[in-house]
Structure formats: structure tokens, C-alpha cells
């Protein structure tokens, strides 16, 4: 039903605490135009929340990181199956 998402469902469940894995998954969802279930969409959005990362990045990275995480969140929120999108390089 959800293509490659179903194939990795077990892996995703075991990585539920791994924010980076969900950020990467979000990137591939955008590149592939894949359909994603709402639960996975919510996990990607939670994993890309700046709150988790704001303290670990040096000051000179914070604005860039904020930009990229906000872009990922916005595109995942508005993602439609079949629509391929790219993040800013």
C-alpha cells in the first residue's frame, strides 16, 4: 500500500528514537514522491523539530540548521504522493 515504507516498517519501528533516520527518510520521501502514512509523517515532523538540536550545534551552524529543518518540515507537511520535491542544497 505505501510502497517502500512498508518494506522498512520493522526497521522504522526499531529506530523510533533515532531522529536522524526519520530526517533521512523524509528526504527520500520527497525525492521519490512516495506516499507516507500519517504516523510516519508525524514521526518525521517530530524528528525534524529544532528543539531537539538547538543546544548541540555551535552558534555559527544554528541559523543554517534551522533553515534546513524548517524547510524539511514544511515540505513534509505539504507533501502529496507522486510529487517529487527537492531540498535546498
Image (cartoon, grey):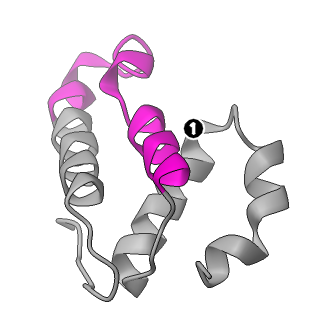
Q: Kindly indicate the quadrant of the structure image that contains residue 67.
A: top left
Q: Is the stretch drawn in magenta largely helix, strand or loop?
A: helix
Q: Position of residue 22 (x, y in %)?
A: 55, 50
Q: Quadrant of the N terminus?
A: bottom right
The front one of 8 and 18 is 8
Q: Where is 17 relative to 8, above or below?
A: above
Q: Position of residue 51 (x, y in %)?
A: 35, 16
Magenta-colored stretch includes residue 30: no
Residue that lies at the very extreme toward the front in this rendered image:
1
The front one of 70 and 12 is 12
Q: Position of residue 64 (x, y in %)?
A: 18, 39
Q: Where is 31 relative to 67, above or below?
A: below
Question: In terms of secondary structure, where does tag 1 sit?
Answer: helix
Q: Where is 86 relative to 66, above or below?
A: below
Mark 1 is surrounded, within 10 Å at the Cα level, by few (under 14), some (14 to 19) or many (20 or more) other residues, namely: some
| 84 on left or right of 19 | left
- Residue shown at the point (34%, 80%) measured from the top left: 81
Q: Kindly indicate the quadrant of the structure image that contains residue 57.
A: top left
Magenta-colored stretch includes residue 49: yes
- Residue shown at the point (17%, 65%) measured from the top left: 88
Instruction: Give, as a single range, the part of the protein colored magenta.
Output: 38-63
| 66 on left or right of 12 | left
| 20 on left or right of 14 | left
In this figure, which residue is indicated by the disc labeled 1? 19
Amino acid at each position: 500500500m505505501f510502497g517502500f515504507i512498508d518494506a522498512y516498517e520493522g526497521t522504522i519501528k526499531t529506530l523510533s528514537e533515532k531522529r536522524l533516520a526519520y530526517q533521512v527518510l523524509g528526504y527520500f520521501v520527497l525525492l521519490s514522491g512516495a506516499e507516507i502514512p500519517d504516523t510516519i509523517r508525524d514521526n518525521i515532523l517530530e524528528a525534524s523539530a529544532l528543539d531537539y538540536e538547538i543546544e548541540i550545534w555551535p552558534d555559527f551552524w544554528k541559523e543554517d540548521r534551522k533553515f534546513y529543518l524548517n524547510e524539511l518540515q514544511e515540505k513534509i507537511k505539504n507533501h502529496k504522493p507522486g510529487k517529487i520535491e527537492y531540498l535546498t542544497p
